[in-house]
Amino acid sequence: MAVEQTTPASPSPLGTYRLQPSRFGQAGLKRIRMAISYFFLFIGACFMLFPLLWMLSASFKPEWQIFTRPPIWIPQEWVQVQAGSENTGINTYSVERSGKDTEVIRLGRRRYTTVISASDLEQHMITVPQAELSDATLKEVGEANVPLNVRAWTSPDGVRDVVAIGRAGDAMAVIEVDQLTTAQVMPLTVVRGAGRANVELLDVRLQAREMVVDGGTQVLVELGPESELVVVSTPEVAEHARLAGKGEVQAARAVTIGSTELDVFTIAGDDSGAEYVRVSDESWQPILELDLIVDHALTVPNSGLTPLDEPFMRPNFSLPRFTLHAEGENPVDVVGLLPGSSETIVLPEEYAEGIRFGPVAKLTEDQTSMRVSGGGIIRIKEGFEEYDDVLDVALFGQPQEMALLVPLADVPDAFEVDADTLKRNTRPHLRIQNYRRAMTATIGGASFLTFFKNSGLVVLLNLIGNFLSCTIVAYAFARLRAPGKNILFAILLSTLMLPFPVTLIPVYEIFRNLGMIDTLYPLFLRSFFGNAFFIFLLRQFFMSIPVELEEAARIDGANTAQILTRIVLPLSMPALATMAIFTFLGSWNDFFTPYVFINSPSKFTATLGLNLFKGHFTTNYEVLMAASTIVIAPTIILFFFLQRYFIEGIQLTGLKG
């Protein structure tokens, strides 16, 4: 029987090509998967790091930059120009003029609004369905460029530009832009200062103002929008700036600058007749170098002082003068710094020549107090920046409201700009003084360094306690044989299911009976009696160490303690580092336990002190952010240097045992 032989069909070249893996395709897919993974990791990291980066940035900012909209991410400082010989500066701005940025300072501002005669409304106002009106858009209309909130009205005759006046039931009362022939821009203070008038047209009640315009009385309706024009000039006008008491500044006239006006003032008692422009109003405080107060100020009873008729005069303020009659000494003329009902802090007149003003805005931070010779208490400001010097000064007397003025004769080139076009003239600057204020602040009678010392001590003692107790118990559960060991280990693990608030009351009673409330003992003493989580962590790691190493050590004569200290613990550094990191984080960041057991500020930990810090500096958020950064910095530094041990300890503990 013949067997028919068949030749197998040769494989198709195309089929063979398709079965072969494409190296380019696999590499491309790998890169895509890696790119997607890194993308989601980056997004997650941004969510995690954003609060930290925001807090770090805020800790280097002044308070006004923390909550600005839009946010200022890089800390800035306002570029200022020196205000004459006064101890202050004037903020500068940047504005575009003639196609280039120009540095300017603000001299005055005035708000404006658009108004229209009520008679024009009566003739041309109509009502239209609200659905036929678009949203309002700000436009400048007519030859005078009057700003109006214009809406598009889709009427049967086509699209028309109108201005909404008010609501008339389900419809809107409007007037066409072409009919606004009497619309004009007027100062908002002038409009709001006129007498009220009620106008009712097409069942729409309008709040109007009755005022004199061009010699006649008109009833005007406010259409809006409100705008603001600012008069600015170059920084050179601040060269001869001076301070004057607000009560001495008198309005004189107004100078026309473009389409707005600049108010001009005179100073009472100034015989020269000079005119000034008001730049700002501030509160100023009399100050004097602290060294003069420490060396020469006295607190004396009022019975030993004889008032003099002429006060001690300084520019813009005065202080009372007395003759001091000290027993056994010649009478001395003194200046009363802080008068009281029974005693007064005085300074010999020869040392009072240096009394001057300092801006209250620079004096409110870092204020403390000191006792003057004789028992009186005076406020002091540490680190006061005066011109190019930093010094400590004493504060006394009452703050004075002052106006900063520049001579009108020094304003040759003033011009108007829209307020929205002004840009703050700032430069990058890190306010290191926020951290200095945070570290030197005294809160509740204790300094922030005291809180750090308490937290460091608690962390150290908890580390020692957990190391001594947990290593011994974990090794016993891992290696030693004892009846019921597994049952005891299960009971130990069951304690992990008990949250601390459940055991808080009995624990509090125990420490109260031991007389340890308001001490640091409750914050670390429990660590010397073991921690269930750390015992479990170390037990699992100890069980992964080969038993043969311990048996060899026993053959060489080592006992259990020597095996634990010389063999097991050196091999368990990753697990011990993990325990140390968890202990540090738990002790350093713990707020609830110190809050329950500690009452005295001198025993507060960093987290509890930070909470008190917040209460003390309610409005100084920049100092609070600096203090928060200082508190969180040790945990970040610790994890940065020990992350390898931490990750290795978690991996080995989870994979073996």
Image (cartoon, rainbow, N blue to C red):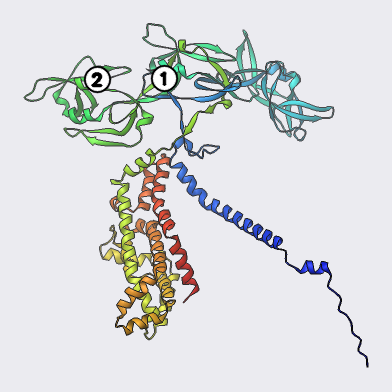
Examine the rendered structure and indicate whether residue 254 appears above or below residue 422: above
| Outermost residue, bottom side | 1
Instruction: Tell me the kind of residue under disc 1.
Output: Leu
Which one is in front, 245 or 212?
245
The answer to whether any part of residue 250 appears in the image is: yes
**Element type at mark 1:** strand
Identify the residue at horizontal 47%, vertical 67% (top origin): 650
Q: Residue at x 46, y 42 (%)?
A: 58
Foreground residue among 559 and 207: 559
Where, quadrant-wise, is the N terminus in this rendering? Answer: bottom right
The spot of residue 145 in percent (x, y) is 67, 19
Name the residue that disc number 2 marks.
353
Q: Is residue 45 left or right of residue 573?
A: right
Q: Looking at the image, do the residues carrying marks 2 and 1 touch, with CB atoms under 8 Å apart?
A: no
Q: Quadrant of residue 377?
A: top left
- Residue reaching furthest top? 272
Q: Which residue is mark 1?
A: 404
Given the image, on which type of amino acid does mark 2 rest? Answer: Glu
Q: Residues within 10 Å of mark 1 (few under 14, many from 20)?
A: many
Left or right: 238, with 194 as reference point: left
Relative depth, front residue between 353 and 228:
353
Query: Which badge, 2 or 1, comes first in the chain's sequence?
Result: 2
Q: Residue at x 44, y 35 (%)?
A: 429
